[in-house]
Image: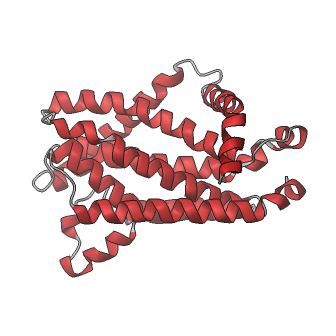
Amino acid sequence: MKKGLYEFMNYFPFLKEVIKRDFKKKYYKSVLGVAWSMLSPLLMMAVITIIFSTLFKRTIPHYPAYWFCGNLIFAFVFDGSNTSMNSMINNASLIKKMKIPNYFFCISSVTQCFITMLFSMVPYFGLCLVIGVPLTPYMLLLPLPLIMAYLFTLGLGMLLCSYGTFLRDLNYLYHVMRRIWLYITPIFYPIEIVPEQFRFLWDLNPIYIYIHIVRDLALDGVLPSERMLIIGTCYTILMLALGAVTFKEKEDRFFLYI
């Protein structure tokens, strides 16, 4: 543990440079640059709102904000874990030239997606003001579920990277899984449409848990239930531990497959 902490601190300046590189690379030759991270969810929100707000307007107050915050968390988890899954392959030339901790590339991938999500929250709060969502002190607690989602995504990304480096088809399978996971996550529909006797199954969906906590704080202006916080914390710890252990076991073989 002490050795790992020393290694992390020793290479931390390099990690910052990798994060900067990945962030700049994402918007390379883009005219609008970071503004895309704000415009893209706004455009999607407009389309989704037009399609679904008529269906759910009686059950979901402030529907545009409801969809917006759910989509932000969902997109971050999948984009962060997907880029992390390919981080060894995408950085093969650098890994072969330098002796650096391999997990730094997973951290960099997830962090640049996390930064993009934070930029996307700027128009979200603007939207809340426009449509009349009350701004409460509970919004100051939003970093808690966001950090939980970040650590969960990092663990998931390291787990996927551990297998995706060897099995390239996992990348295609994960995109199929994304579509399935999207429809079983209450992003554009209310959880109330699910029969009550089956709602416990949604507790098995970590992304729903994080979205639920964010909506409690940002939309409903209430503290999340202890049950949701405990479940979310357990998912975060378990996924981060599983990802880290699996990554550590397999990283010695990465060099042979990149």
Residue 96's quadrant in the figure?
top right
| Direction left: furthest residue | 58
Residue appearing at x 65%, y 24% in the figure: 28
Give coordinates of residue 223: x percent, y percent: 18, 51
Q: Is residue 151 above or below residue 181?
A: above
| Front residue of 170 and 237 | 237
Q: How many marks?
A: 0
Residue appearing at x 46%, y 23% in the figure: 35
| Direction front: furthest residue | 2
Q: Is residue 58 above or below residue 99?
A: below
| Front residue of 242 and 33 | 242
| Front residue of 132 and 216 | 216
| Direction bottom: furthest residue | 197
Please indicate whether residue 243 sits to the left or right of residue 164 in the image: left
Residue appearing at x 63%, y 27% in the figure: 20
- Residue 133 in sight here: yes
Please indicate whether residue 204 sits to the left or right of residue 192 in the image: right
Residue appearing at x 66%, y 53% in the figure: 85
Residue 184's quadrant in the figure?
bottom left
Give coordinates of residue 118: x percent, y percent: 42, 33
Asked which colour scheme the image uses, the reply is secondary structure
| Direction top: furthest residue | 31
- Residue 159 in sight here: no
Give coordinates of residue 26: x percent, y percent: 62, 31
Give coordinates of residue 1: x percent, y percent: 65, 54
Please indicate whether residue 238 sits to the left or right of residue 229 in the image: right
Please indicate whether residue 256 sits to the left or right of residue 29 in the image: right
